[in-house]
Image: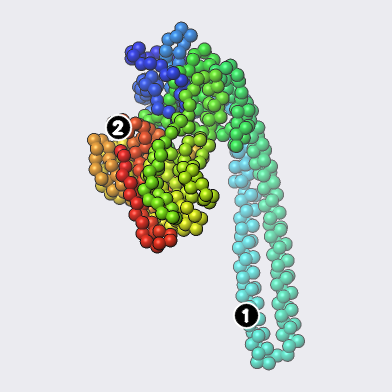
Amino acid sequence: MLHRFKSNIEGIALPEKFTWPFHYVPHALSRLAADEVMEYVASRTEWQEELTAGKMFGVLVVEAEDKSIGFLAAFSGNIAGENFHDYFVPPVYDMLKPTDFFRQGEAEISAINQRIKHLEQSEGYRKAKEGLSTLKASLEAEWRNFIEQSALRKADRDRRRQNKECDEEQLILESQRDNADKQRLKRRHKTLLAEAEAILHEQQTEIESLRKERHSRSAALQTALFKEFKMLNQRGEQMDLIELFAPTPQILPPAGAGECAAPKLLQYAYLNNLKPKTMAEFWWGESPRGEVRKHGSFYPACNSKCKPILTFMMQGLDVEPNPLTEIAPPEPKILFEDDYMVVIDKPCGMLSVDGKSGVRSAEGWFKEHYPTYDGPAIVHRLDQSTSGILVLAKNKDVHKELQSQFITRSVKKCYIALLQAKIEATKGQISLPLKLDYDNRPRQMVSADGKSAITDYEVIGYEGNNTRVRFYPLTGRTHQLRVHSAHSDGLNAPIIGDDIYGSGQNADNRNGHRLCLHAERLEFTHPIKDKRVEIESKAEF
């Protein structure tokens, strides 16, 4: 499983610290290892149809006991229905072997599913469901007809009463008869429905019992499985997945936990006395539906499945600090200020609001400079990596009015971006609804049940193989411009420096690793003076 590099690596220095896997720039050795893995994967023609649908792979550069350097390779999940393939490290726990309790448990649950399906398709169940449905429709029609006729009879009584065509006692008697008929009809309907529901319930009892048994067996099987994933760390300590996830908000491990590439790599290294030096994960194949994944691009480890696991497994390693907590953004520049608001040019790396990382925020900057105001200041937000115009209010009424303008979309916004590809269309509109990718926060994904997200764009010019564009977002969803740029149904061109939906690097390295997205222009109505205010800020990329 330990591979030696084909190319000469003598001139490449080892990293001083191990990779922080949730936000990183791949080390040169990781890139070389990934290139070799990609070459190998491409040679396995029998896998190509399956892998075209998309698969995450990982590499771990390690130091052997003799101080020689090599690398390990892994894939997430399985390939061709198997966990073991010669080139790759084995799973932490093989739940696919035929004699394993998990496969046997799955077979038992599958048998319950078949029994439920058989019962649901049985003649008795079908007739009971259809009978109840037909009865409900018939009784509803009968009830509507009675109510209509009752209304006509009442109208006739009202007419006769008005014209004194009948004595009052007769009219009261007719009304009482109608009410009695109504109550009898209600009781008859209730009885008929109860009889039909009882027949269906008799058919459903076994189905519901089987469903409860299925749920109970499934939960117990998952728990037993997760306890078999006994993860190691550099100190030689061991914890299973149930223990690792118990302190987290989700409490229970999500499906697939422990099967990603990164945990497999570290587990194998610890078991074989190999010292982890640097790690990276890359995507192979097409992007999953709704997500943004680019073939050959590197991605951070996921938060929902991997963070609790890797945080434990890296204990004992000298790990790089989280680069997001090491950011020291420069002071923002004030673009406009009066008694009611201040508009700043937020630098790349500064948060909009205070966060857990401790990185300085625009909200914190405001509190320092305007300590007497204790109300909400941030009117809208920019991503930490996005620079540009940000509006902060100096009193609550102004804050409320300005926020209202953003909500009602009367604010005109313009962003400038540099895209990591050449796009053909010179202008157009992107409409891709977005929602949170819960397994990979804070990533967003395109989904039909997401919130509407609409962006107009125009190409300003081309810079080599890159495209400079202006974006005019008509909505303000999280990561809207980043997803609309990178998604295959959008511009299919990630913003340069995007470490979430792109490669995280600049093609020409002019701008380091910053996200080349800048809020360039903002136009809104002054909440007090009732005049349009237009603010501009020039991008520095």
- How many numbered markers are drawn? 2
Label ID, residue 309: none
Report, in whole angstroms, how far the alpha carbon at label 2 lies from the one at label 1. 83 Å
Residue at 39%, 59% in the rendered image: 525
Residue 471: give x, y in percent of width and height: 33, 48
Q: Amino acid at mark 1?
A: Leu
- The first of marks 2 and 1 along the sequence is 1
Q: Residue under circle 2?
A: 510
Tag 1, which secondary structure?
helix
Quadrant showing the C terminus: top left
Residue at 48%, 50% in the rendered image: 377
Tag 2, which secondary structure?
loop
Could you tell whether 508 is left or right of 53 in the image? Answer: left
Could you tell whether 139 is left or right of 294 in the image? Answer: right
Given residues 83 and 140, the one toward you in this image is 83
Q: Amino acid at mark 2?
A: Arg
Given residues 91 and 206, the one toward you in this image is 91
Residue 289: give x, y in percent of width and height: 42, 40
Residue at 74%, 83% in the rendered image: 172
Residue 529: give x, y in percent of width and height: 40, 62
Residue 202: give x, y in percent of width and height: 70, 49
